[in-house]
């Protein structure tokens, strides 16, 4: 089956599954903020519009400065990209022909970016609880130039605490290996422990962040990287001129002022996550203890979730399949946390499934 490689754009998924798309569907496959973009983006949209008649600042100086100030870094340690996806792609180019390890299952773009740049790729798998066996990883991490780690991890939603990252980083440092931590969902984590202070101590640390998840602007495309100034320069040399558009630059600056909105989001997501998990527990669905706005779930009475997946699609519920996540291929489904109403509809459909499939438990 030729499954789409990412969430969102559900019509591709229905086509691949050979199921007629119901008139009303609920898309749980894209994990962006269920509250939508901050209101200030709507309000200032007219001002952003003015930007379209100018070429954007190719150095994104204003946004870089603002980010650097917020994070306590020098602006030369900050790189702005056309979404985290562009940054991953540029890192892949920068690593051309190198030996790269990826902690799996994880976001598929790391492998894609490294593969097209002829890296030699190896994998390290998290355990069944979504954790990393650090001593084992240290043993496996021989002769690698770079290690990719997603934290919190997509698709599991599991957050690795700073202490774990520090252990991995120390090992990487001893082995002269870059550690690339993708923090695309860091701002959804309640007890997030910043890794930025480690940047000045460890020049082999690279942090990637996306602004499209928290601020619900995947159509605008904006992300940033924080790393040693030499790495920032190397990526800048590879990036197409004017790659980040003027609307994204302005919207990005506006989003950085939205501290209350971020807190509100975290509160909402936590409340909904706890509510959903209570019901899943009651109906004996298996799920991983996510720290973010998405989670993995399965009906543990079946190894492959394909029957459950097809049932949900027919009911208009669109989860993210996991066929292209190494290590869990098809054994779980990933759901975004959506609005209260959409989550209610999801729970109704889950209960309907459970009523039909009670006997197999
Ligand atoms: C873990 C992770 N990193 C990076 C990205 C890229 O995000 P964007 O390019 O929208 O910033 C995604 C998108 O799904 C993701 O899941």
Image (cartoon, rainbow, N blue to C red):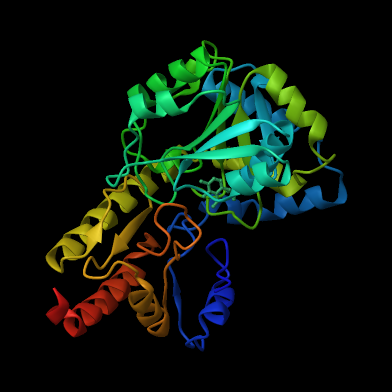
Name the residue rendered at 51%, 59% in the picture: 324
343 to the left or right of 246:
left
128 to the left or right of 252:
left
- The percent position of residue 276, horizontal first and vertical second, equals 24, 61
Which of the 4 image quarters holds residue 162? top left
Depth check: give the residue in front, 186 or 329: 329
Which of the 4 image quarters holds residue 180? top right
| Any part of residue 251 in sight | no
- Compared with 171, 359 (above or below) is below
- The percent position of residue 45, horizontal first and vertical second, equals 67, 54
- Compared with 139, 331 (above or below) is below
- The percent position of residue 149, horizontal first and vertical second, equals 48, 36
Quarter of the C terminus within the rendering: bottom left
- Compared with 183, 296 (above or below) is below
- The percent position of residue 57, horizontal first and vertical second, equals 81, 36
Quarter of the N terminus within the rendering: bottom right
| Any part of residue 56 in sight | yes
241 to the left or right of 36:
right
Name the residue rendered at 12%, 65% in the picture: 282
């Amino acid at each position: 089956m030729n499954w789409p490689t990412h969430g969102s754009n559900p019509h591709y998924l229905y086509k691949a599954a050979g199921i007629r798309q119901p008139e009303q569907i609920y898309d749980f496959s894209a994990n962006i903020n269920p509250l939508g973009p901050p209101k200030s983006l709507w309000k200032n949209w007219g001002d952003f519009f003015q930007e379209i008649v100018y070429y954007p600042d190719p150095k994104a100086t204003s946004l870089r400065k603002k980010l650097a100030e917020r994070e306590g870094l020098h602006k030369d340690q900050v790189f702005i990209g056309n979404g985290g996806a562009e940054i991953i792609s540029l890192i892949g180019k920068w690593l051309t022909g190198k030996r790269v390890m990826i902690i799996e299952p994880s976001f598929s773009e790391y492998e894609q970016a490294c593969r097209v740049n002829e890296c030699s790729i190896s994998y390290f798998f998290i355990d069944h609880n979504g954790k990393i066996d650090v001593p084992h990883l240290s043993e496996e991490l021989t002769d690698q130039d770079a290690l990719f780690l997603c934290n919190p991890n997509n698709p599991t939603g599991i957050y690795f605490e700073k202490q774990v990252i520090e252990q991995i980083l120390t090992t990487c440092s001893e082995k002269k290996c870059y550690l690339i931590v993708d923090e695309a969902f860091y701002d959804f984590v309640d007890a997030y422990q910043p890794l930025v202070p480690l940047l000045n101590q460890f020049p082999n640390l690279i942090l990637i962040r996306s602004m499209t998840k928290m601020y619900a602007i995947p159509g605008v495309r904006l992300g940033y990287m924080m790393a040693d100034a030499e790495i920032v320069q190397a990526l800048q040399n590879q990036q197409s001129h004017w790659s980040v558009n003027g609307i994204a630059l302005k919207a990005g600056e506006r989003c950085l002022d939205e501290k209350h909105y971020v807190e509100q989001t975290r509160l909402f997501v936590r409340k909904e996550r706890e509510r959903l998990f209570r019901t899943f527990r009651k109906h004996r669905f298996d799920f991983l203890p996510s720290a973010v706005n998405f989670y993995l779930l399965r009906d543990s009475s079946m190894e492959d979730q394909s029957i459950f997946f097809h049932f949900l699609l027919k009911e208009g519920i669109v989860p993210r399949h996991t066929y292209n996540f190494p290590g869990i291929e098809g054994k779980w489904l990933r759901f975004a946390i959506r609005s209260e109403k959409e989550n209610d509809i999801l729970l109704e459909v889950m209960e309907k499934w459970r009523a039909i499939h009670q006997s197999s438990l």
